[in-house]
Image (cartoon, rainbow, N blue to C red):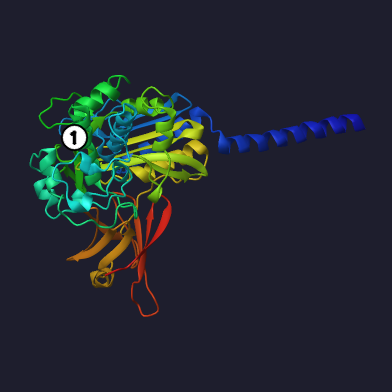
Amino acid sequence: MSAAKINISRCIILAAILSQIVNVSLGQTNVPNQEITSRADEYLSTLTKLERFSGSVLIARDGKVLLSKGYGMANLEHDVLNTPQTKFRTASLGKTFTSASVLMLQEQGKLKVEDPICKYVPDCPSAWQPITIHHLLTHTSGIPDLTAVPNFRKTATLPSTVIETIARFKNKPLEFNPGERYSYSNSGYILLGYIIEIVSGKSYAAFLRETIFTPLLMTDTGYDNYDLVLRHRASGYARRDESLVNAPYIDMSIPFAAGGLYSTVENLYLWDQALYTQKLLSEKSLAGMFTPLKGGYGYGWHIDRQFDRNSVSHGGGINGFSTNLVRFPGDKICIIVLSNVEMTPVGPISRDLAAIVFGEKYQLPTMRVAIKVDPKIYDAYVGRYDRGGDRFLTITREGDRLMGEAVGRKSELFPESETQFFLKVAGTQVTFVKDEKGKIPYLILREGGRDRQLKRVQ
């Protein structure tokens, strides 16, 4: 073979190698849409087969929907499947609409976020005098969370006017001075809903419908009500041991502007798309909404970085439902996960779906198997572990079972070893760490592929 032919052959081989390198690189940063769809569907179908997911999911990139599909059952008793049109309670994801409503009223000149809330709240406690609307929006008011008030779950079954709901936490002492730090508080967003009604002269439900849902053609979104006959409504479930049961009742007057809405994945995608425009809010208001402050929280949104990209998100949990919406504005990517089983790990699921979109590492779900251990070892683990933000993971022993409780919800921890446990419902892992004396100074909580060290405080 001539030297010229050898050089040509070498060039062809080199070009092929370079092509493969480029393709691999592009695969990591620009995964083809079809591949995203098939991998995400495989992941979600596996979760569903393992009975770890029931709900609807939407994934979109650059204005194109790549996946919009239901998994599992919307109603187990009538064998009704989840679909992209199934309506779910959105829980705290609805705070994104409450914050937008406040900013719309500010643009109309009807309020300012710097206004003290006592300007609008009658018989305002003296401790609330320094609190502004800004503090409520950013969870920096110091007002205790309604869900932490004693007997909340029992009283949540009864209808309540917003004034009656506010009275439940109105005279509680502040947890800290306003603006001092971040601590998530549903109470603050209930107050925001009340202020929206006072300023606008309309009910919270009517204001959202007229100013957001109707203009954006979100016809499958609204304020939920038990009496409402709602087509395609998902039933909400909870886990009891190995089975699903109907979730405990909650009167939807209680969550109010902190989490009283219902929607579909397709309607929430309309909301995502509107936030790239100025249909509802000016560029200045949008910038304020997505500016991270204490705790990485803006106005109704968590601002963070995932996979070395900026993300904005909000999740929610209410009796029978778990929700999450995450946006990657720089990449025009939106991932929406709505589940009709409470405590479903929608945050970690969303993160795995984002990994699929970006070509990052993720693992297909697998069946985890519990082993038998001597229940006496559980006694050493019983205690409270600090999650941050005045929230704790409480470990208790109930007979031969080890239980973990957070945010008022209790789940059994199943042993994989004498120190490592997992939650069947959430895929969460807890590892108790012993010191040289055999004591447990902290545990490691693994959620969504991330490890957090929780110090024992009791």
Identity of the residue furthest to the left in this view = 158
Q: Is residue 384 left or right of residue 11?
A: left
Q: Nearer the viewer, residue 114 or 144?
A: 114
Q: Give the image quarter of residue 6.
A: top right
Question: Residue 280's x, y, as percent?
Answer: 36, 24
Q: Give the image quarter of residue 411.
A: bottom left
Query: What quarter of the picture does the C terminus occupy?
Result: bottom left
* Above or below 394: residue 32: above
Query: What quarter of the picture does the N terminus occupy?
Result: top right
Q: Amino acid at mark 1?
A: Ser
Q: Nearer the viewer, residue 211 or 118?
A: 118
Question: Residue at image x 26%, y 43%?
Answer: 116
**Badge 1 element:** loop
Disc 1 target residue: 235
Question: Residue 217's x, y, as percent?
Answer: 30, 19
Question: Residue 219's x, y, as percent?
Answer: 26, 21
Q: Give the image quarter of residue 320.
A: top left
For mark 1, does the 10 Å Cα neighbourhood hold few (<14), some (14 to 19), or many (20 or more) residues?
Answer: many
Q: Is residue 282 left or right of residue 246?
A: right
Question: Residue at image x 42%, y 44%?
Answer: 292
